[in-house]
Amino acid sequence: MSLITAHDLSKTYLKGETKVEALKGLSFEIEPASFVSFVGPSGSGKTTLLNLIGCLDKPTSGVLRVDDTDVSSLNTRPAAAFRGRKIGFIFQDFNLIPVLTVYENVGYPLLMVQNTPSRERKKRILSLLEAVGMAEKKNKYPDQISGGQKQRVAVARALVTNPKLVLADEPTANLDHKTAYMVIDIMKKMKNELGTTFIFSTHDQKIVGEAETIYTLEDGELAGREVNNV
Amino acid sequence: MFDLFKIAIRNLLRYRRRTLLTVSLVSIGVVSVLVFISISGSFKNMMIGQITDSFLGHLQIHKKGYVSSIDSLPLTLNLSPKALEKVEKAINEIPDVEAYSKRIKFGGMFSNFVETTNVRLNGVNPEDEVKTVPLLLSRIKEGAKTIRTGEVLVPELLAKGMKVKVGDTVVVIATNSNGSVNGKQFRVGGILESATGPGGRDGYIHIDDAAEILRMDTMAISEIAIRLKNFDKVHEVFDRLKGQLANELNKQGKPAFEVHTWEKLSPFYNIARMIDLMTFFVKLMLMAIVLISIMNVMVMAVYERIREIGTIAAIGTLPGKILAMFLIEGLSLGIFGAAVGTVLGVATISIVSMAKLTFDFGRQKGLLLSPSINIQDILLISMMVITVSVMASLQPAYKASRMNPIDALRHV
């Protein structure tokens, strides 16, 4: 069974008095434990689509099911609860919480979202910090580590709740090439180890090649689907 | 909850200067209120103590209608022995009464054989009077600290005006309830310092002398002053006495007696109420300071952390938890402000207390200001500050909790 099913998905919003059709009748399916990329120029609808899949926004029309849940009808609180249980997020600007250490940042979703017991929490945080190679920096604050290290911490934070799906909007945009590949490698490694589905958006053609399935978006429409044997 | 506090405190420490300024502002407010309450409270309590312990007593009982005509000290409204017996029975049934004193109050003429003036006198039993108003003896500036038969305690101003001193012979002339005039020679036994309030400038003689001047065959008492073991029970005892005496009716079928607390007898009560009102407004100002400063900080905190709010909302933090995070931040500011303010306030009060400052009130000079604050007031002020801090954080916290994650994440 597919992890994500989108059928005739559209999103229209108003920008001032102008009606903008951000997504126009998208239909696709994404299987569990896949490594998927959405590519396209700025304004093609990548972020809007990730926002819909991540239950941060609702489609104007169409059906969107994530892990067998119709997320297009979820209200604020159920949507937040769903995100907390099923989805991990990686942001372009890392978005680590500056007053928390690396260890605490990774543990935040377990502590504040899932209320995981202390012992279990510690085990999962340390294991993920080890996996992303940040265990030694666990007591550092975000302003004491580099951009690449921040994004590795963000990957660990996204995975700490064992989500079915991790969404990453331009995760390598603020990183140099070497660091960007390293972050993508970590994401792939985690996908293979944990069976998590990763969906990321990018306009970096070299990074795109790392994805198993590449969807191309143009002007809010699905312009192509390419399967990569990586 | 502990983790929410930890995050809140770290966020507060993130903007150290701003947090320090806000905590300082709240603390200064708390210090000001505590010092004001302690000084005004100690002044009020001291003045009440002076008034009740010098001449008024905590409660008084009269025949119905006496207090409304008290300026003329009507002898026709004195209590008959039978009425007195009923009143004493009611008083004796109340264990909270420490002492009571029966007084014959009358107005008369005071002569030093050269000049004559009018005088208001209290005929009292010295032992009962001193037990009821223990500061009376301390008001005797000159002469023996007692009231003996044949002697009069002359009010200071009268003594000065009539140029009499201890040991001089004077004459007191009075008209009794039948209109018969009588006079009696007295030796000035002491000069009495004035006290603030009605009755504070009255003279004293022995009750037997009063009965003799007024040619009373049987003792007719004008008023009974009562002292309680615990001043705080004044209203409780008042209600009880009033209830017990309510069934005693006069010939017109109305209550035969009237009971008054010191509040109804002394104009200082209005000053005390004014002090209470001022205290209320000072507290209100503190609340305004806390409300504005905390709200300002919290609005800034939310505005500066919009992207952070977007992040935590996106990763699944429920709106209630985001609300709690910011409320706890405001709560922490309130707790710090109240704690620092309380410590500094108590220290300031101790310093003022140790400085032994004095003040004058009316004709009373050199009254010692001894400010003190009780734990209930400290807890009340702290709780008010903390509650208002949380209330001030409510709007910004609510706004944060309702933020759309997409808009928040886009915020630059």
Image (cartoon, coloured by chain):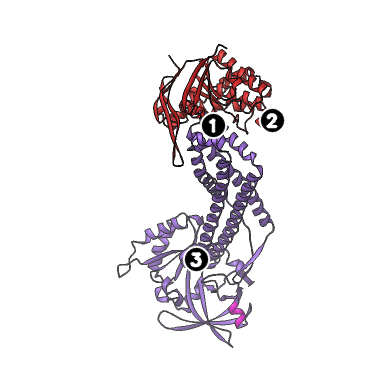
Chain colours: A red, B purple
* Crowd around label 1: few <14 · some 14–19 · many ≥20 (10 Å): many
The part of the image, by quadrant, that contains residue A208 is: top right
In the rendered image, residue B349, in percent from the top left (x then y), is placed at 64, 54
Q: Which stretch appears magenta? A: B157-161
* Earlier sequence position, callout 1 versus callout 3: 3
| Horizontal relation, residue A67 to residue B302: left or right | left
Residue closest to the eye, A198 or B321: A198
The chain identifier of the residue carrying mark 3 reads: B
The chain identifier of the residue carrying mark 2 reads: A
Between the residue at mark 2 and the residue at mark 3, the CA separation in whole angstroms equals 65 Å
**Tag 1 and tag 2 share a subunit:** no
Mark carried by residue B270: 3
Residue lying at 63% horizontally and 33% vertically, measured from the top left: A98
Residue marked by disc 1 = B312
Q: Secondary structure at mark 2?
A: helix
Q: Please, what is the dominant secondary structure of the magenta stretch?
A: helix
Residue type at tag 1: Ile
In the rendered image, residue B100, in percent from the top left (x then y), is placed at 49, 62
